[in-house]
Image: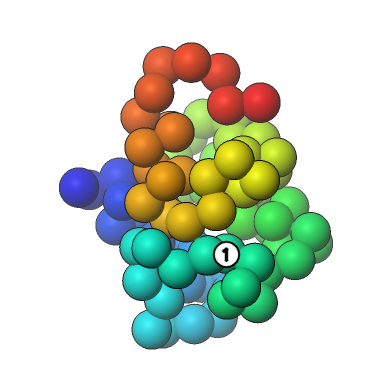
Amino acid sequence: TQLERRVLDVWRETLQLEQLDLHDDFFLAGGDSLRAMALAAKLESALGRPVAPTLLWQARTAAAMAAELTDPAPND
């Protein structure tokens, strides 16, 4: 989906990895708590809505995060 592509683009930028896939785990790909904070801020800017950094502990892949962001329930 378009949301998945946007989320994945931000993940790739944040982790500085061109070969990151929708189903790659953020933390196994080199992410840490500081990058999680940066990712949340970049996603908020890109999507125009709040994104809690703690969402990464629930949705550790770009595909899972996009699915969570599609859900109308709060993500924090």
The spot of residue 39 in percent (x, y) is 62, 56
Residue 6 appearing in the image? yes
23 relative to 74 in the view: left or right = left
The spot of residue 46 in percent (x, y) is 46, 47
Quadrant showing the C terminus: top right
16 relative to 8 in the view: left or right = right
Residue drawn at x 70%, y 40% is 54
Dividing the picture into quadrants, the one containing residue 38 is bottom right
Dividing the picture into quadrants, the one containing residue 72 is top left
The spot of residue 44 in percent (x, y) is 55, 41
Residue drawn at x 47%, y 56% is 61
Query: Which residue bears the numbered disc 1?
Result: 26
Residue drawn at x 57%, y 64% is 26
> In the rendered view, would you say 34 is above or below 63?
below
Looking at this rendering, what residue extends furthest in the left direction? 1
User: Which colour style is shown?
Assistant: rainbow
Q: Amino acid at mark 1?
A: Phe
> In the rendered view, would you say 26 is above or below 73?
below
Looking at the rendered structure, the number of numbered marks drawn on it comes to 1
17 relative to 27 in the view: left or right = left
Say which of 28 and 15 sits in front.
28
Within 10 Å of disc 1 (Cα), the crowding (few <14, some 14-19, many 20+) is many
The spot of residue 17 in percent (x, y) is 49, 82
Looking at this rendering, what residue extends furthest in the right direction? 34
Residue 9 appearing in the image? no
Residue drawn at x 75%, y 66% is 32
18 relative to 45 in the view: left or right = left
* Label 1: element kind: loop
